[in-house]
């Protein structure tokens, strides 16, 4: 925790009073020194990429008004730009020179006042003030589902059953979007106690805690959204989809952990069943708008149940210490 200067204004910027930031595994990796890049010429980085704030000042003629609830986009296109960034698909940057608020070379939103370019802010419904901080992780799964649908449409595609592996915030929000799409939704996680089974049940989905091979072999899901990054779960999901199944990987696996895999069997399964495996990370402006729509349609009480711990700003370091029963931990900036 530290005092910083007032954020400097840029042309077309919004001035925002911070309400909350979410804390995720990426934040914990940065805080422990395993990941992240400070802005050039600096040795500190303001954290916070899961944002929520209220507009204090908006430039004349913009689409924003004072008191609007807004979320700041995380990634910015690279300065070259590559062809993907030049077409607004900066989540798919091809040369790695993108920057990210609170992660890579740009200060984040973990401050009581912050600025954001109007072109990289998205409004959110006023009734979502208590849960709007879930917007950024929802963008991640909005993109994942978009990728699944685009791949599925290479041919006839009418999925019926989805399996979400991992019941953290990303997995639970992926399950929410699955239910909104009318799919028979199943969630797999290793815990048997705490809030997760009840959160899944309240969504109208089915919770499982057996091993991946047992659950997926029985379900034969048409779609898997993988949100654990655990090697055995990843390969168990790939091996047990229905014919023409799609596995979308959103969890990042730690390097250095070895796993014995029958590569020939995996290849045979994918080829002979026309399966597809795709990785998905980050989001662009289109996905932020999709996420805003999804949250607006969701049950607000259910969304509130995902936030299992809200830490006041004067105790912000406590948010980085995982506790039993945590799902989503949020730092309140507006005390």
Image (cartoon, rainbow, N blue to C red):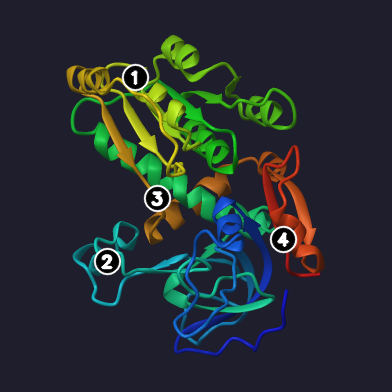
Q: Give the CA distance from mark 2 to mark 3.
A: 15 Å
Residue 65 in which image quadrant: bottom right
Residue 281 disc label: 3
Q: Give the CA distance from mark 4 to mark 2.
A: 31 Å
Q: 115 or 12: nearer the eye?
A: 115
Identify the mark nearer the N-term, 4 or 2: 2
Residue found 50% across the figure and 34% down from its top:
180
Identify the mark nearer the N-term, 2 or 3: 2
Helix, strand or loop status at disc 2:
helix
Residue 261 in sight: yes
Identify residue for label 1: 239
User: Measured from the top left, where is residue 152 in percent x and y?
Assistant: 26, 32
Q: Give the CA distance from mark 1 to mark 3.
A: 22 Å
Which of labels 2 and 1 is toward the front?
1
Q: Are marks 4 and 1 in contact (CB under 8 Å)?
A: no
Identify the mark nearer the N-term, 3 or 4: 3
- Dot 1: within a 10 Å radius of its alpha carbon, few (fewer than 14), some, or many (20 or more) residues? many
Residue found 66% across the figure and 43% down from its top:
303
Identify residue for label 4: 331
């Amino acid at each position: 925790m530290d005092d910083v200067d007032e954020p400097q204004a840029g042309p077309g910027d919004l001035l925002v009073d911070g309400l909350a930031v979410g804390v995720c595994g990426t934040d914990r990796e940065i805080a422990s020194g395993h990941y992240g890049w400070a802005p050039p010429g600096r040795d500190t980085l303001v954290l916070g990429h899961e944002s929520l704030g209220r507009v204090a000042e908006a430039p004349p003629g913009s689409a924003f008004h004072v008191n609007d609830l807004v979320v700041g986009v995380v990634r910015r296109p690279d300065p070259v730009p590559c062809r993907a960034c030049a077409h607004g698909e900066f989540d798919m940057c091809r040369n790695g020179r993108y920057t990210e608020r609170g992660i890579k070379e740009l200060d984040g939103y973990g401050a009581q006042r912050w600025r954001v370019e109007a072109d990289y802010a998205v409004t959110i419904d006023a009734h979502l003030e208590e849960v709007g901080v879930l917007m950024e992780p929802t963008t991640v799964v909005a993109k994942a589902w978009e990728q699944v649908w685009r791949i599925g449409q290479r041919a006839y595609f009418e999925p019926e059953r989805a399996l979400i592996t991992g019941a953290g915030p990303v997995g639970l929000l992926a399950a929410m979007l699955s239910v909104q799409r009318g799919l028979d939704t199943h969630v797999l996680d290793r815990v048997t106690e705490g809030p997760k089974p009840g959160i899944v049940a309240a969504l109208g989905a089915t919770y499982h805690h057996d091993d991946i091979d047992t659950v997926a072999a029985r379900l034969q899901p048409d779609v898997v959204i993988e949100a654990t990054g655990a090697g055995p779960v990843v390969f168990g999901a790939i091996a047990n989809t229905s014919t023409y199944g799609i596995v979308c990987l959103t969890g990042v696996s730690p390097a250095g952990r070895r796993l014995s895999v029958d590569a020939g069997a995996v290849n045979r399964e994918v080829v002979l069943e026309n399966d597809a495996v795709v990785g998905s990370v980050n989001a662009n402006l289109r996905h932020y708008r999709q996420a805003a729509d999804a949250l607006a349609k969701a049950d607000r009480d259910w969304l509130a149940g995902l936030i299992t711990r809200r830490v006041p700003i004067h105790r912000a370091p406590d948010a980085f210490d995982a506790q039993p029963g945590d799902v989503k931990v949020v730092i309140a900036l507006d005390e």
